[in-house]
Image (tube, helix red, strand yellow):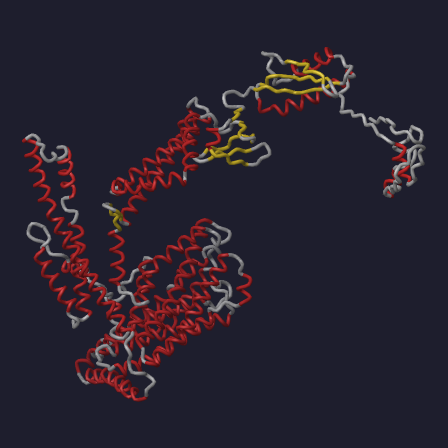
Amino acid sequence: MTHPILMTVGRGGVAVQRFLLAALVLFMLAGLPVQVLGQTPPGAETTNQQASAAPLTADGQLDYTAWGALADRAEKAVADNATESAALDKLRGQLVDWREALLGAQNANSSRIATLRAQIAALGPVPAEGETEAEEIATRRAQLNEQLVTLQAPSIAAVEAYSQADGLIREIDRVLRDRQAEELLRLLPSPLNPANWGAAYQAFAAATATVVNEIRVRWSLPAARQNLLNNLPAILFLLLLAIAAISRGWALVQMIIGRLLRRWSARGMRISALAISLGQIVLPFIGMLALSGALQLSGILGIEGTKLAVGLPVAGLAFFLIYWVGGRLFPKSDDVTPLPLAPERRAEGRMLCTLYGLLLAAETLRAILFDSQVVSDAAQAVMDFPMLLVAAFVLWRAGRLLRVPKEIQKTAEDDEGSFRIRVTGFLSRAATIIGIVGPLLAAIGYMPAAKAMVYPAATSLVLIGVLFILQGLLRDIYALITHAEDDGEKALVPVLLGFALMLAALPVFALVWGARVADLTEIWTRLREGFQIGQTRISPTDFMIFAAVFAIGYAVTRMFQGALKTTILPRTKLDQGARNAMISGAGYIGIFLAGLIAINTAGLDLSGLAIVAGALSVGIGFGLQNIVSNFVSGIILLIERPVSEGDWIEVGGVQGIVKSISVRSTRIQTFDRTDVIVPNTDLVAGQVTNWTRFNLSGRLIVPVGVAYGSDTRKVEKILREIAEAQPLAVLTPPPVVVFQGFGADSMDFEIRLILRDVNFSLSVRSEINHEISRRFAAEGIEIPFAQRDINLRNVGDLARAIRGETAPAVAGPAAPAVAPTQAPAALRRDLTPGEGLTPSSAPGQDETDGETR
């Protein structure tokens, strides 16, 4: 059904219709009322729907005779190329209503059919060939099968009729799309040909003369003049209201914004300013309504003049809406600038928005003026060309305005900034190219193609601006609610809301670029029907039901876990590990049950996917075997609890405290405060040392070495006294001092004692070592350190080499000449005779022993 606002825009105003339709859809998305003109009478919509609904028989069933007649008429209309597009569109609407009714009829008697099938299944399988069954069972099976066939007949007929209706709708859509494509590529006379200018002038003069002549005729009637005099007070009041609202409404709203914002907080300033600024659309629009009412109340307008008067609010709405968008995107003030533009570039942006708004308003009135006129293609092309040139100029200048400077491109290094720059650059290039190509196509004669490019491109830029404003509004509302310090710039929720807003605006952009409302409703119908996998049909409705039920089940599970953790389990005698295991197990069971209940509630029959799932499970088993193994190991850890949170364990050379156990891995915090993620399989299949699982007591061994010659009995007594004096030492069994043996440098002892809490082993070890050092020093017992004996050979030759002397000759067989060795200067300086090495043997002696400690 066409909206009352769009009914006033006649033939030729396609761009305006698309813009206003897009604006109405945006208003409906924002929850604003759109019935601003020509209010639909109460019950009219219902009456129309009932009139186009599928007829029913006396027993409440679908009238398939009427459906057959409609299907035959539709097939003939599709086969006839002379059928007008309006007639095809009307037939399509009736077919859509029938298709909806047939889709609902497919589920007729579904519950009764399911019951009959269950009864037949309860009788057992059908006997094989050559076998028999009891006569009573056979009779009952035949009766049930007969009832089943009778109940399935309506749904089978509905399925067949639904397929036919769906096919006819597809054929009509194909025909309409083909005609739309042919219209776009239709070559019209060139508007630059002077021979066509006369026809355009004559058409414009004829349309204007029609309006003027109607006014003259009405003015010549005494009743019309008397009606004007009688309504003169009301007309003057409406005119004054129109002048005040149109001329001063914008300034009045600006003044209100300036006064009220001084009293409000900074967080709500932008939200309040945006809400109040909508008055800059509403007040002037009220003025246009008053002007239209005054003109109609005068009674001197004819049929065409009345159409123009009714269309004035529509034209005003288009202008004021675009003018408002320009004021919000390119404000005069430097306080809040949505786009980083210089003041002169913002002024240019406001000028372009104003120019495009005036263009759409003029296009609206021109379409109404020539609605009932028979205009030739040449005249139509000539009259469309100036409007198209203005729209192309606006588009070209907008493309240059959106061009991102190179210095900004270089500074935007983050992903978000670079993405915005790429999108802005794409819009800039696209607008510039369309602004140039569009007029060239129109000059050649492809006026429909040019209009289908230029007007939707310019309107798309306006809609992108509206989305930009709405995204800023969502961000400000989020910042106001959450008291975010960065105004929600870095928050995730505003980004997700903005993304959802962009998805919701996709149908609006489709309408702007020439898509029919029927195309969008058809896509929505396909989505509602869903897709079929095997014998299972899955639709978005099923997904929404599944998501809602699963979300409820998940929330209930989390609430139950919270009650277990805070209320129930603390009152039991279970340790912390058992509590955590029960909480985790309740979570897994709850999520599993929530999934099952959601699947059953959504009516998803997954039995048909059993074979596919079985085939996929093989590949998934090989690809995810480690993950599955860790998951099973996590379940085992929660059930057997060999390791619990807070235990001190050692696994794979890693020691630390268990902080958390998940379904795949366990997090261990080492004593140097680093987190180690250990797969659960290592804890189940590997060797794990748990120091604190069943009790906190543990043995501590402290090795001690004393010098040779010390009294071993005295050492043993001192060490036993030190061990027994420790507060954490267990006296049953008592600490033990063991004389281990004789080492290379010391006699080795060990203190072995059991601690009540092994977590304090380091502090106890440190305290014992301190006490050993103190007692040994008091008793004169020496703690040895490592000693080594070093033997040096040929000390004399080494000393002479250090001094740079030549070795003396030795009597006997001639020895080979050996070149003098020159030692480094630093070595000669540090090792001089008498320091470090002193030869103790006469020249010629081969070996000298020295000892150092």
Say which of 339 and 607 sits in front.
607
Say which of 218 and 392 sits in front.
392
Would you identify the image quadrant in which residue 310 lies? bottom left
Q: Is residue 697 above or below residue 341?
A: above
Residue placed farthest to the front in the image? 813
The percent position of residue 809, horizontal first and vertical second, equals 94, 36
The percent position of residue 743, horizontal first and vertical second, equals 72, 19
Residue at 34% from the left image edge and 73% from the top image edge: 360
> How many marks on residues?
0
The percent position of residue 816, horizontal first and vertical second, equals 88, 38
The percent position of residue 181, horizontal first and vertical second, equals 27, 70
Is residue 716 shown left or right of residue 377? right
Q: Is residue 197 above or below residue 737?
A: below
Residue at 77% from the left image edge and 19% from the top image edge: 782
Q: Can residue 751 be seen from the camera position used here?
A: yes
Would you identify the image quadrant in which residue 447 lies? bottom left
Residue at 29% from the left image edge and 83% from the top image edge: 189
